[in-house]
Image (cartoon, helix red, strand yellow):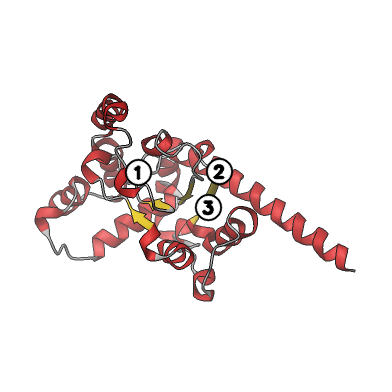
Amino acid sequence: MAQVLRESYGPYFVFRDRDEKLRKEFNVFKRYYHQTYDRYLNPFRDRADKKVIYGHLEVEKYKRAFPDAFYMTFYRDPVQQIISLYDYWKRTPVKFPKRISKARRALQEKNLDFLDFVKFVLSHEDSYFYNVQPEQFQFTGLTEEYSKSLSILKKKYLPELKIPKEQMALNTNPDKSTDQSYQHPEMAELKQLLANEISIYHRAKSKFESDYDSISRLRLNHHRGKQ
């Protein structure tokens, strides 16, 4: 997605938010932000001339600075996500031991089985699942339906997007969530553990499907108009 944005708006006008410390300590940031906003004007003046700001960030962070901005995001099936993360970490050697997360360190040192790993992530980490409400965004895409998401984004919201053909063929492991190695009884318990994350994902998916249906109807009406 970042590549699409840079090609559409120009590299200079696309800003990647790297405020990692502020993101991880967001409650502290909110207090600081609201106390200093009026005193120092816009704390984000270093990115005020940008057309796009992207990254792993809280929506509330920019609402006051850019109240009329278009907010969009992508969701991933949380079942697929945690399976993919576990499998990847199990088969991939650690390159920088001092930089790994608590979850990966626990997996490495305690040799956690899959469900114990999921429980550890849910109780110790806050950055692996995207628990942001989809209603906060004008557009919600799905990584499993990346090409359709780009199509919706361009046809309904951002017609100026320049989307390379190769981007239209990128979907994130669409069949991974049905991996046979995590079927019953683990799958049932996994879905119970991730009930909140799955609920949020289904709402995002419903919003995505509504958008897709609307552009499908527009295409059909356009086609009928030509006949």
Residue nearer the viewer, 174 or 11: 11
The kind of residue tagged 1 is Leu
Residue found at x 50% / y 62%: 174
Residue nearer the viewer, 14 or 131: 14
Residue found at x 23% / y 35%: 25
Which SS class for mark 1?
loop
Q: Alpha carbon of mark 3 to alpha carbon of mark 2: how far?
A: 10 Å
Q: Alpha carbon of mark 1 to alpha carbon of mark 2: how far?
A: 16 Å
Q: Which residue is mark 2?
A: 138
Residues packed near mark 1 inside 10 Å, few (<14), some (14 to 19) or many (20 plus): some
Where 125 sits versus 6, above or below? Answer: above
Name the front one of labels 3 and 1.
Answer: 1
Residues packed near mark 3 inside 10 Å, few (<14), some (14 to 19) or many (20 plus): many
On residue 141, which mark appears? 3
Q: Residue furthest left?
A: 98
Q: Residue furthest right?
A: 227
First in residue order: circle 3 vs circle 1: 1
Q: Which residue is mark 1?
A: 57
The kind of residue tagged 3 is Gly
Let me know if residue 223 appears in the view.
yes
Residue found at x 55% / y 47%: 139
Residues packed near mark 2 inside 10 Å, few (<14), some (14 to 19) or many (20 plus): few
On residue 112, which mark appears? none
Which SS class for mark 3?
strand
Let me know if residue 192 appears in the view.
no
Which of the image's four quarters has the N terminus? Answer: bottom left
Give the image location of residue 85, x and y in percent.
Answer: 32, 56
First in residue order: circle 1 vs circle 2: 1
Q: How many marks?
A: 3
Which SS class for mark 2?
loop
Circles 1 and 2: CB distance less than 8 Å? no
